Amino acid sequence: MGRAYQNRKDSIAKTSNQKARIYSRYGREIYVAAKSGGTDPSGNLTLRGLIERARKDQVPSHVIEKAIDKAKGSGGEDFAVARYEGFGPGGCTVIIECLTDNPNRTSAEVRNCFGKVKCKIGVQGSVSHLFDHCAILAFERDNEDEVLEALMERDVDVSDIESEGGHITVFAASTDYSRAKQALTEAFGEIDFEADEIQFVPQNTVSLEGEEKLLLERFLELLDDVDDVQRVFHNVE
C-alpha cells in the first residue's frame, strides 16, 4: 500500500472545443485498437477497456461506433505510435504518447511545447528508465489474497497489489495487460474497473512550487492543444 499512481481521467470538458479534443483522442485510440486487434470488443480486451473508459468519460456512442465502423473498412488512416521523452520545468521527467499520421509534424509540435517553457526534449530512453510501464487494474474487492491467487494461476507478472477501503489495485507488467484482465474476469465475473489502462508510473516523485509549478501547468496546457498527443505522464506529485 501507499504506492501512488496517476489514474488519468479527463474531466468533463467545459467548452465544445475541449470536448471535441477528448472525443477525437478517444476516437483515434479506439480506431487503432480495433484496426490492430479486431472490431469485436469481446475478443479484443484492449478495445473493450477503451470503450468502457470512453463511456465513463461521457463520450457519445456515435463517436465510438464511428471509430469502430471506420476500422472495419479497408484502407483508412495509418496512425503510428510516437513517444517523446524529456525534462520539464524544475527538471521533472515527462513522457508524451502520441498517435500520428505525420511524425515530422508531431515531432515539431511537441518540440515547440518544450521550447515555449524553456525545457529540453530528450532522446528515446532518456527518462523512461525512471518509470515503470505498468498495466493498472483497479476495482472493488476486499480480498487481496484471492486476487493474487487468480493472477498467479494464469502466470501474470504482478509487480504490486494495493488493498484499501474495499478496493484492489493491481500493478502488472504492461505486456500482461490482456492476460491479467482475462484472469480477473474469469475468476470473479464481470468487473466494473475503476482504472483499466497501461501507464508509465514514476519510480520517484518530485514537488514543484511557485514559478516552476505554473510553468508545468502551462506546459501541460500546450501539450493538450496538440491534436496528436494522447497521454502525458510525469513525476510531479
Image (spheres, grey):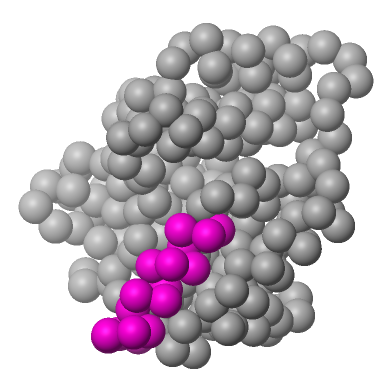
Q: Viewer-proximal residue, 13 or 124?
A: 13
Image quarter (top left, top right, bottom left or bottom right) of the C terminus: bottom left
Residue 100: give x, y in percent of width and height: 76, 45
41 on left or right of 204 = right
Height in image: 186 above or below 209? above
Query: Is residue 177 among the parts visible in the rendering?
Result: yes
174 on left or right of 135 = right
Image quarter (top left, top right, bottom left or bottom right) of the N terminus: bottom left
Q: Viewer-proximal residue, 103 or 130?
A: 103
Residue 137: give x, y in percent of width and height: 38, 47
Q: Residue at x 90, y 20 (%)?
A: 75
Residue lying furthest left: 165
Residue 155: give x, y in percent of width and height: 54, 53
Q: Quadrant of residue 86?
A: bottom right
Q: Viewer-proximal residue, 19 or 164?
A: 19
Q: Residue at x 55, y 50 (%)?
A: 225
167 on left or right of 204 = left
Q: Viewer-proximal residue, 70 or 202?
A: 70
Q: Is residue 103 magenta?
A: no
Q: Residue at x 53, y 60 (%)?
A: 222
Q: Which residues are magenta?
A: 205-223
Q: Residue at x 34, y 28 (%)?
A: 56
Residue lying furthest bottom: 91
Q: Is residue 218 magenta?
A: yes
Query: Is residue 187 among the parts visible in the rendering?
Result: no
